[in-house]
Image (cartoon, rainbow, N blue to C red):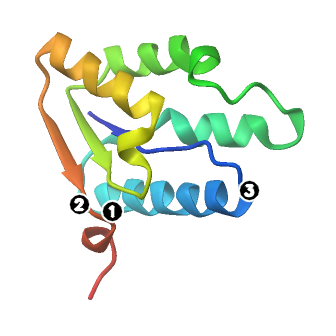
Amino acid sequence: MIYLAAPYNHSKFWVVENRMRYVERALAYYAAAGVSATSPLLMHHCLNTGIKLPSTFEFWEKLCADYWAKCDALVVLTLPGWKDSEGVRKELSWAKRDNKPVSFLDVKEIYPR
């Protein structure tokens, strides 16, 4: 199963919402191809709507690590800000530590031409 990583936090709400639409689209892209993929970001985002749980990676790290343990590979959705994301950096370090493959998915790849 693929673990899909992407940046989440941003000072502008609409940027976070836009990022989540791209994550949803990327997961649909994999589902359409018959590939199992998951992203803890969607659960985080859904749970954070109305309840306002912390949005720091420190708070969500255990949940993300539990998902990671079940996955075979990491795919980073290269949205603007991915290189600066604390969560993405940590997820990349897990992949290196666990010797799991890493690939990068450009947004252009998930939209039909």
Residue at 84% in and 33% down: 52
> Quick check: 108 left or right of 43?
left
Residue flagged by tag 3: what amino acid is it? Phe
Decide which of 42, 32 is in the foreground and name it: 42
Residue flagged by tag 1: what amino acid is it? Tyr
Residue at 74% in and 56% down: 13
Instruction: List the single residue furthest toward the right.
Output: 50
Residue at 63% in and 54% down: 16
The numbered dot on residue 33 is 2
Residue that badge 3 annotates = 13
Q: Which quadrant of the figure contains the N terminus?
A: top left
Separation of residues labelled 1 and 2 (CA atoms): 6 Å
Q: Position of residue 15 (x, y in %)?
A: 63, 60
Residue that badge 1 annotates = 29
> Quick check: 80 left or right of 76?
right
Is 83 above or below relative to 73? below
